[in-house]
Image: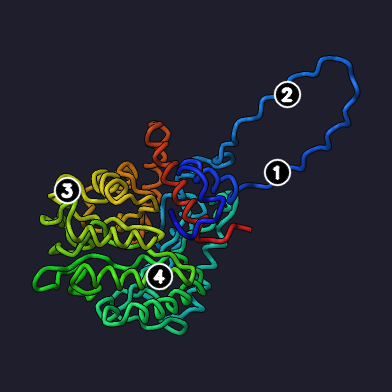
Amino acid sequence: MSSRRAPWVTLGVVVTLGAAVLAVWFARPAAAPEAAPKPVPSSATPSPSPTPSATPDPWDGWTLEQQVGQVFMVGVNVGDPKAVSTSAIRDDHVGNLFLQGRTTAGADAVRSLVDSFTALVGPTSTHSTPLLVATDQEGGEVQVLRGPGFSTIPSALEQASLSPAALQSRAATWGSELAAVGVNLDLAPVMDLVDGVPADNPPVGALDRSYGFTADSVTTHANAFSAGLSSAGVGVSIKHFPGLGRVTANTDDTAGVTDSVTTRDDASVGVFRAGIAADPMSVMVSTAIYSRIDPDNPAAFSSTVVTGMLRGDLGYDGLVVTDDLSGATQVVAWEPGERAVLALQAGVDLVLVSKDPTVAHEMVTAVLDRARSDPAFAAQVRAAAQRVLVAKGEWLSPAP
């Protein structure tokens, strides 16, 4: 359980916990009760007390479309925002935003962009529920936000040369910069263990995205990064479970990317176990295939990986987000709508639609269609949306 949870959140089992968040954090004002009439003396036998009403449905007042919208995160290009990202929130009720691309315009410009999207939050769009606003601010080659108001963040490999205390302090500064522009989730740090020789695999090692080349170095420094951001009120997403440190191609631009080494009890998986112990807001699941775990499905579509390993083996009860499912070459063999459905069926909570937001509508529609015809799937979607709202209840201020 998260150390950030308010006292009313920590009571009960997960189902009760989620209901409490929905009922208390997102409750709508009710009409004031009428004054009770004064009792009239009577010699008649008193009537039995009325049976207490059932616990209110925490989803009361939410449309199915609004519930489904909470399990999506749509991208907006920070250098060239498009109307399609706006319509995803306003018309398709998408409840979360990802700042993608690159910008050097600085903090004021980013704050203005974020404000233009948070202004879309309302009773008809997101049921007045605030957005998770995320970006990729790892450092080095992967830093979306630059310019006045943003530090130049060193790569993870350079960060690993710092003491954990020094890294945590600097990460707190980087987190404060994100919080100042309205970003509340950083899809970082990378916790992939690159232990091959040479340690230069395309998606991680070649870009210096690894916090060293041993499990201890990765764990110690990635957790220091997470602690620093968390202290500034910004959540993190450790990635890319169960690890991209051993693949020989990048899922962003290559299909059929497969890890033929990693097993369920591998040291690289143990790194994520240690990362989960540091209480991240979320864990990102990769789209690579792990032939010794589930040879038939990319990890983001695999119930073995998401539900069996991450939830079961590692005991993780927080938010699970996919790597990008909109523009990654690894998943082009599936239609966009099918990608979203498969991820949610596997146990994912949040579908990332970052690179190509034009497919968000198709994805949302596919999930709605399946939820309307399949009660079991609808229950999975509702459970995923509940975990999204629990995360928001822990990390965000309530909507006014």
| Label 3 or label 1, whichever comes before in sequence order | 1
Question: Disc 3 residue type?
Answer: Ile
Question: Disc 1 residue type?
Answer: Ala
Mark 3 or mark 2, whichever is nearer to me: 2
Name the spot of residue 167 as percent of width and height, x first.
Answer: 35, 79
Q: CA distance from mark 4 to mark 2?
A: 53 Å
Name the spot of residue 298 as percent of width and height, x first.
Answer: 21, 50
Label 1 close to label 2 by CB (< 8 Å): no
Q: CA distance from mark 1 to mark 2?
A: 24 Å
Please determine whether, in this image, residue 201 is positioned above or below residue 85.
Answer: below
Camera-side residue of 355 and 211: 211
Camera-side residue of 345 and 273: 273
Residue ranking furthest to the right: 41
Please determine whether, in this image, residue 84 is positioned above or below residue 188.
Answer: above
- Element marked by disc 3: loop
Question: Disc 2 residue type?
Answer: Ser
Task: Give the residue number, with chain letter if any, for mark 1.
Answer: 30
| Label 3 or label 4, whichever comes before in sequence order | 4
Disc marking residue 227: 4
| Label 4 or label 2, whichever comes before in sequence order | 2
Density class for disc 1 (Cα within 10 Å; few <14, some 14-19, many ≥20) is: few
